[in-house]
Image (cartoon, rainbow, N blue to C red):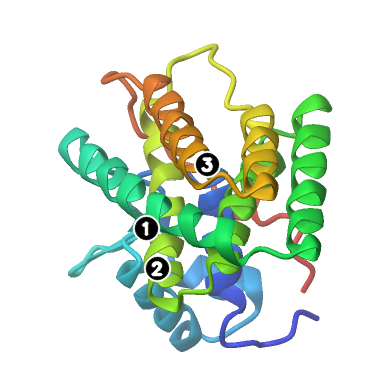
Amino acid sequence: MVAKSKDLVYEHVYEAILEQKLAPGTRLSEESLAEIFNVSRTIVRRSLLKLSHQQVVQLRPNKGAIVASVSIAESKQIFFARRVVERAIIELAVSNHTAADLQSLISIVEQEKACFTRGDRSAGIRLSGEFHFKIAEIAANSQLKNFHRSLVPQTSLIIAQYEKRGISHCSYDEHLQLIKVIAAGHVDKAVDLMMCHLDHIEDKLNLDGLPSSEDLHQVFAKIKK
């Protein structure tokens, strides 16, 4: 039986959104989530509230919660915020990193590449996010890290809505380049590469993406009760 952790629902739903397993607009039924995770609806409600504070879930009065949809205008604002935050984070990471940090980044990218190579896109997307989370951790600024943690899954929602068809999301080559310049201590090059990396992500988007929905039981089918 799954442990009734107060963060259980939050962690799994957050990860499913990050991996784009839950599409924008997906209804997050309290009853279904409580059944899937074998927890009380109170725990589900608290988890959804926490996710709403990170702007990846929308709580609608008398209608329940859904995975957030992001407008074109909001998408541009989020990418602007990502650029501001990632610039500060990468500058700090270049100064603060250790050899162990670099090895952790390399390990994440190797796993990311392996996932995309075998066609496991969801896991690859999650690891891509983990790469950026790790850099934020290396930066060692808790305020930047917390803000960054809300921006990454919002970016994932934007990609789910607006990514051009037939375009690969793979970014591990750019991640490897970032590791090299971090290791070399080149702040300006690291900033330039990070900005180009975000530009490339945004270049893969269009204005025609439409939200779809996923079945909660299907997404969390592997959860053992």
Residue 52 on image: x %, y % = 32, 68
Which amino acid type corresponds to the residue marked 2 in the rendered image?
Answer: Leu
Q: Label 2: which residue?
A: 144
Relative depth, front residue between 186 and 112:
186
Q: Nearer the viewer, mark 3 or mark 2?
A: 3
Q: Residue 170's x, y, as percent?
A: 63, 27
Mark 2–mark 1 distance (CA, rounded to whole Å): 18 Å
Residue type, mark 3 in image:
Ala
First in sequence: mark 1 or mark 3? 1
**Residue 128 at x, y = what percent?**
62, 44
Q: Amino acid at mark 1?
A: Val
Residue at 53% of width from left, 15% of height from top?
Answer: 167
Q: Tell me if 157 is positioned left or right of 224 in this view.
A: left
Q: Nearer the viewer, residue 20 or 59?
A: 20
In the depicted structure, whether residue 85 falls above or below residue 205: below
Q: Could one spot residue 56 in this view of the protein? A: yes
Local crowd at mark 1 within 10 Å, few (<14), some, or many (≥20)? many
Locate the C terminus by quadrant: bottom right
Question: Which one is in front in this view, the residue at disc 2 or the one at disc 1?
Answer: 2
Quarter of the image for residue 217 reads: bottom right
Residue 13 showing in the rendered view: no
Residue 84, relative to residue 11: is it above or below? above
Mark 1–mark 3 CB contact (< 8 Å):
no
First in sequence: mark 2 or mark 1? 1
Q: Which residue is mark 3?
A: 190
Q: Assign a secondary structure to mark 1.
A: loop
The numbered dot on residue 56 is 1
Query: The residue tagged with tag 3: helix, strand or loop?
Result: helix
Residue drawn at (63%, 48%), measured in percent from left and top? 182
Alpha carbon separation for disc pair 1 and 3: 29 Å
Residue at the location (37% across, 58% down)? Answer: 56
